[in-house]
Image (cartoon, helix red, strand yellow):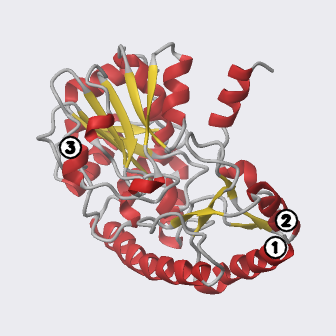
């Protein structure tokens, strides 16, 4: 394997690889292992329609639900097979230079490099709390990609700092896969139609336990969405995805997600306190329901935790992080205590 192939393989690494059957999973940032009962019922009721091709009316309902949820119009919505499809579509914009802010979710860089798009990494650093600095983004970049809140650092960038990256001739892509896990979504740009060139990606995976369904959507100017969608095949999104998007954008579901976000914020605070009792492990105060840690002898710690039945996400596949970095998902306090107890033992045994 060449160094280029090895580097690409690292970028393709995701938390589901670190998790395995029989392990207590702190590697995957999905809030619940199964969708809530009411959502399963909605999807089950849609099964009888699978004998027909996805109807345009179902797509219109899904886009209308998303538009109402974010104060947009339906033509500013593109329903996706997961947010990852949105990244895969970015090369259709034919950028001359893409700037990807790191550390962050690596699929955008993979998709762009695979398509031959020149990519420049914009590296953020812990000394500045992984804060976003607009001056680090090259002026010549006509495509900029970043996450907010950012995976794996769990940093939430101010909306106005993110919006300041917009300029004529540039497309600004903001991955908001975890935005609904932040109470009130205070820094979201999803409802902003006044930022030129803005594309916002949202996912249903994290909050609603739908990783296996692949459901998400893009928000942006109609002409930008049309360019992205041009090579998609007929019926690009299945009926169950359309039903899920519709259901999860209805007011009752949005209220439920907000309640979960508030509860999770409390769980995150307790998780940070519990980890703090083990030492100075938390790299930066988390805004999302996952925590970036730095531990001595990180690979040994990760392997020892695995031997004890605990899965955590390795950090060295994220540009700018090392083998001593681990990302852990926040769970309910009684479950998170399993990780803390195992980590205490492992650190004592080093």
Residue for point 63% across, 77% down: 279
* Residue 319 place in picture, x, y as percent: 56, 39
Examine the rendering and report whether any part of residue 238 can be seen.
no
The extreme front residue here reads: 127
N-terminal label among 3 and 2? 3
Q: How many residues crowd around disc 2 within 10 Å: few (fewer than 14), some, or many (20 or more)? A: many
Examine the rendering and report whether any part of residue 86 can be seen.
yes
Is residue 106 positioned above or below 244 on the image? above
Is residue 313 positioned above or below 36 on the image? above
Residue 346 - label: 1
Q: Which residue is mark 2?
A: 304
Q: Nearer the viewer, residue 275 or 180?
A: 275
Quarter assignment of residue 348: bottom right
Q: Secondary structure at mark 2?
A: helix
Q: Label 2 near label 1: C-beta < 8 Å?
A: yes
In this view, the mark in front (3 or 1):
1
N-terminal label among 3 and 1? 3
Distance from Cα at disc 3 to Cα at disc 2: 42 Å
Q: Secondary structure at mark 1?
A: helix
Report whether 212 appears left or right of 176: right
Q: Nearer the viewer, residue 250 or 345?
A: 345
Is residue 85 positioned above or below 113 on the image? below
Q: How many residues crowd around disc 1 within 10 Å: few (fewer than 14), some, or many (20 or more)? A: some
Q: Which residue is mark 3?
A: 163
Q: Secondary structure at mark 3?
A: helix
């Amino acid at each position: 394997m060449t160094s280029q192939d090895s580097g690409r393989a690292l970028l393709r690494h995701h938390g589901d690889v670190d998790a395995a059957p029989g392990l207590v999973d702190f590697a995957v940032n999905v809030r619940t292992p199964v969708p809530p009962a009411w959502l399963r019922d909605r999807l089950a009721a849609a099964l009888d329609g699978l004998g027909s091709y996805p109807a345009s009316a179902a797509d219109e309902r899904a886009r209308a639900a998303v538009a109402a949820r974010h104060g947009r119009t339906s033509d500013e919505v593109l329903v996706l097979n997961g947010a990852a499809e949105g990244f895969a579509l970015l090369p259709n914009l034919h950028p001359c230079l893409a700037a990807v802010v790191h550390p962050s979710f690596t699929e955008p860089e993979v998709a762009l490099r695979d398509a031959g798009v020149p990519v420049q990494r914009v590296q953020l650093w812990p000394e500045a709390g992984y804060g976003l600095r607009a001056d680090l983004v090259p002026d010549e970049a006509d495509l900029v990609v970043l996450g907010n809140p950012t995976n794996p650092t769990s940093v939430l960038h101010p909306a106005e700092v993110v919006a300041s990256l917009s300029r004529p001739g540039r497309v600004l892509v903001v991955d908001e896969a975890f935005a609904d896990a932040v109470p009130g979504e205070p820094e979201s740009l999803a409802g902003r139609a006044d930022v030129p060139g803005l594309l916002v990606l949202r996912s249903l995976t994290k909050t609603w336990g739908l990783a296996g369904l692949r459901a998400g959507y893009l928000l942006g100017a109609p002409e930008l969405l049309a360019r992205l969608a041009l090579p998609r095949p007929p019926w690009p999104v299945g009926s169950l995805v359309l039903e899920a998007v519709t259901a999860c954008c209805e007011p009752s579901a949005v209220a439920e997600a907000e309640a979960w976000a508030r509860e999770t914020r409390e769980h995150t605070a307790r998780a940070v306190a519990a980890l703090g009792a083990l030492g100075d492990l938390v790299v930066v105060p988390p805004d999302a329901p996952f925590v970036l840690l730095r531990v001595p002898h990180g690979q040994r710690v990760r392997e020892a935790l695995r031997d004890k039945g605990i899965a955590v996400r390795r950090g060295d596949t994220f540009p700018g992080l090392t083998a001593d970095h681990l990302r852990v998902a926040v769970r309910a306090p009684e479950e998170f205590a399993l990780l803390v107890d195992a980590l205490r033992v492992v650190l004592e045994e080093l």
